[in-house]
Amino acid sequence: MFIMLMKKCLLSFICFYTLTANAQLNVSPAVSANVLISSFVGQGITVSNVVITGSGNAYGTFSNGNTTNLGIEKGAVLTTGSAIGVKGPNNSGSYGTCNGLSGNDAQLASISPYATEDMMILEFDFVPQTNKISLGFVFGSEEYPEFVNASYNDAFGFFLTGPGPACQAGFYSHTNIATLPNNVTPVSIDNVNTTTNSSYYVNNLGGATIQYDGFTKKIVREVNVCASQSYHLKIVIADAGDCYYDSGVFIEHLTSGAAVLPIRMSDFSATTEPQAVKLQWKTLSERENKEFVIMRSGTDGKIERIGSLPGAGNSNTEKSYLFYDRAPLNGINYYQLLQVDENGNQTEVGIKKTNFNLQIAKVQLYPNPTSTEVSVTFEKGVYRKLILTDLLGRELEVIAIKPDSYKEVLSLRKYPEAIYLIRLDGPSQTRVEKIVKK
């Protein structure tokens, strides 16, 4: 109850920002069901039995998004208050509109049992043309950043019902597909913010074009389905605890079929090596391809960026790419490969899963020889310092080892080609290994 009262009390404090003039979204509220559906449903999808439940002020279509920092040009928007209100600038830290509607939804309650106020629901049946659907969306909220991990969070979900990839009956049963691309982590205020999965978060405090204090980057979910079979999708969003501090979900597309991508992939693989995971992929062609970004997550669902490689820009010849994760998680690793074009738009082009079982029976150096860096693994709790020396015993670098650490990565880029010694010092023993810089 304290959090709920604090949310109401904070309404009396409105922060104004000095903003430069900028273009805004064009928003049309309370449009017909056909107009709403046609704003985001695209190729390969046939829709029927559309039902809209909620205030007409709370939903609509939008365009002109390319002049804002939203990351989506046009589509549909469903909110917990005012569709018009999503337009910027961000001149309030607590913008909210109460529509006087409350309700209970069993699926949404599984995400947030307090999400019952200003509920907005869009549901429909659809038939996909192919065995995969693609869904692109952005979630934003005025609850950022004050109410991260505050329990009373606004909630939303995309709940899919229908047969599975191999036409298994009942495979999807109100399954929430509004997740991060790892297919595990639900998109929510607590799961995407400045400290958790921050690569997906946009801090919009003082923003000139969108009202919400924060929102996600565009998230694209690809879901395996059964072609020509019937599915039901229910999109639900609601305020938690009270009707203030609006939230909204912007839907860019729901399509089925081959997407037109800036690149054509021919291969993507992830293989385990003694002390690393090797990621390889090839492209047959590239168009305005700025870079590839590699994301990784484990069974806890936390996604982190672990590296990137520059793209070829424009190419009509086969290109090969190689990336090593030299500090993989011990256990299941999910690798997500993102392609970034020259405009900053991200497209997921592959996900791979590996099971990396790190066996540490002795000190191991990998790779050796090396021209860049070496991964040094050892038993936990045995050593306190890692020391790099030359063959004369002169110390070049000293790294303190934490008690629970079993690996250190040492860069040799600044050292000339030679043979060096890596010494591990502990209270009861010392270990020395040779490393060759080539």
Image (cartoon, helix red, strand yellow):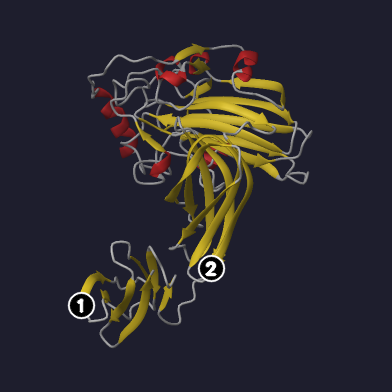
Other-residue count near label 2 (Cα within 10 Å), few / some / many at <14 / 14–19 / ≥20: few
Q: Which residue is mark 1?
A: 394
Q: What is the three-letter code of the residue carrying label 2?
A: Glu
- Picture quadrant of residue 130: top right
Between label 1 and label 2, give the one nearer the viewer.
1
Q: Are marks 1 and 2 in contact (CB under 8 Å)?
A: no
Q: Which residue is mark 2?
A: 273
Q: What is the three-letter code of the residue carrying label 1?
A: Arg
Q: Earlier in the sequence, mark 1 or mark 2?
A: 2
| Between 15 and 129, the one nearer to me in the picture | 129
- Picture quadrant of residue 171: top right
Q: Is residue 120 left or right of residue 162?
A: left
Residue 402: horizontal and vertical position, in percent? 29, 70
- Picture quadrant of residue 50: top right
> Helix, strand or loop at disc 2?
strand
Residue furthest left in the image:
394
Report the residue at 52% width, 55% height from top.
322
Q: Is residue 61 left or right of residue 7?
A: right
Report the residue at 61% width, 41% height from top.
317
Q: Is residue 146 left or right of residue 168?
A: left
Residue 380: horizontal and vertical position, in percent? 37, 76
Report the residue at 34% width, 15% height from top.
22
Other-residue count near label 1 (Cα within 10 Å), few / some / many at <14 / 14–19 / ≥20: few
Per the model, the C-alpha gap separating discs 1 and 2 is 32 Å
Residue 152: horizontal and vertical position, in percent? 40, 38
> Helix, strand or loop at disc 1?
loop
Residue furthest bottom in the image:
428
Residue 373: horizontal and vertical position, in percent? 37, 65
Q: How many marks?
A: 2
| Between 271 and 242, the one nearer to me in the picture | 271
Q: Is residue 211 visible from the viewing direction of this image? A: yes
Q: Quadrant of the C terminus?
A: bottom left
